[in-house]
Image (cartoon, helix red, strand yellow):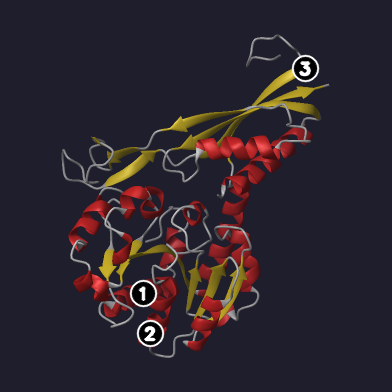
Amino acid sequence: MHEYSIVQALYDSVMTQAAARGALSVHGVSVRIGELSGVDPGLLDTAWRTFRVHTMCESAPMEVAVVPAKWACRDCAAEVARGRILRCPACGGSVRLTQGDEILLERIVMEVA
Amino acid sequence: MCESCGCGDPNLVPVDLQQRILSDNERTAAHNRHHFVDRGLLAINVMGSPGAGKTAILEATSRALDGGRLIGALAGDLATDNDARRLGAAGIRAESITTGSACHLDAAMVHHALHRLPWTDLDYLFIENVGNLVCPAVYDLGQAANVVVLAVTEGEDKPLKYPVMFHKADLVLISKIDLLPHLPDISVDRIVDALRRVMPDPRYFTLSARTGEGIDDWVTWLREQERMAASGAYAMAIGGGRLV
């Protein structure tokens, strides 16, 4: 369960941003989590709810956007469906992950004086 | 002005970032990687389930890597230093990283532990991660390559069940093949088929630390990587993402 260490890093980033803007409190955070990032969105939310207690983020919900994994050919950009052999079905070229490994903090809504 | 919920509260301010949450770990990993590249040291992050055979493979590797090569290891373990002691007995300069309840190593743990090793003299550094097919995959340590050990006893569909771990692997070692005669339902071909569905162009070797079968292939691969590390080829690759 590494989601607590992810939330620790997230919290540190939020607090750095909040301090830089002299925020009084944080009202929400939005994150973007790839399907193949190794982070479970449900566990991340649970960890956030636990972690934020008695902090400036106490009433800040976390909005999680889950990004599906997509594979595409390096040569012809044809997509390869999930679960298939990772070789281009069109030209036989090599395939790479084009999205789905993100672990991003996208937005913070904070109250300023 | 609050634009997110439409409440109109002028004191609520949205801040858009697109910031990588693990950027601190990534910075420390990059720092480790620069150390390794500067010294021409080949650092390998060895991952896999508890009991997959990571330590046994490193013991066999130490026996097989001749030519006066100095091998170091950092062994991640929740509660004991058993693995580091085993590796030490096999001729490896090994230190333990006791993680307590943490299920993975991160770049800062590796950086701190490096100071307990004569790491600037090493030719190889194996970072034996905590036995776990989930969490270690998320953390860059500064390694040149990720190697995942998968024992034939774990079942053929492990790569499909843990796609993130195998997607991150540069090389898979399918281990304990000496047990195959006792596992009539297990097919290496089906394991490889599963790998092809989560890894583009998977590289893998089949081996047994017990009998030594296949260890030569793995050691040949390591020597090629060591030559690249010593020649600065990895320095060229830094910034380009994947190093292998």
Closer to the camera in the image, B213 or B171? B213
Closer to the camera in the image, B49 or B203? B49
Q: Is residue B49 left or right of residue B116?
A: left
What residue is at 50 percent from the left and 43 percent from the top? A39
Q: Earlier in the sequence, mark 2 or mark 1?
A: 2
**Where's residue B28, x and y in %?**
61, 57
Closer to the camera in the image, A21 or A35? A35
Chain of the residue under the numbered disc 2 shown in the image = B
Q: Are marks 2 and 1 on the same chain?
A: yes
Q: Are marks 3 and 2 on the same chain?
A: yes
Disc 3 marks which residue? B11
**Where's residue B25, x and y in %?**
60, 53
Vertical position of residue B145 compared to residue B21: above or below: below
Q: Could one spot residue B181 in this view of the protein?
A: yes
Q: Mark 1: which secondary structure? A: helix
Vertical position of residue A38 compared to residue B33: above or below: above
- Amino acid residing under circle 1: Leu
Vertical position of residue B140 compared to residue A13: above or below: below
Chain of the residue under the numbered disc 1 shown in the image = B
Q: Earlier in the sequence, mark 3 or mark 2?
A: 3
Disc 2 marks which residue? B65
> Could you say which quadrant of the image residue A48 lies in?
top right
Whether tag 2 and tag 1 are in contact, CB under 8 A, the answer is yes
Closer to the camera in the image, B177 or A70? B177
Disc 1 marks which residue? B222
What residue is at 17 percent from the left and 40 percent from the top? A89
Q: CA distance from mark 3 to mark 2?
A: 64 Å
What residue is at 39 percent from the left and 90 percent from the top? B67
- Amino acid residing under circle 3: Asn
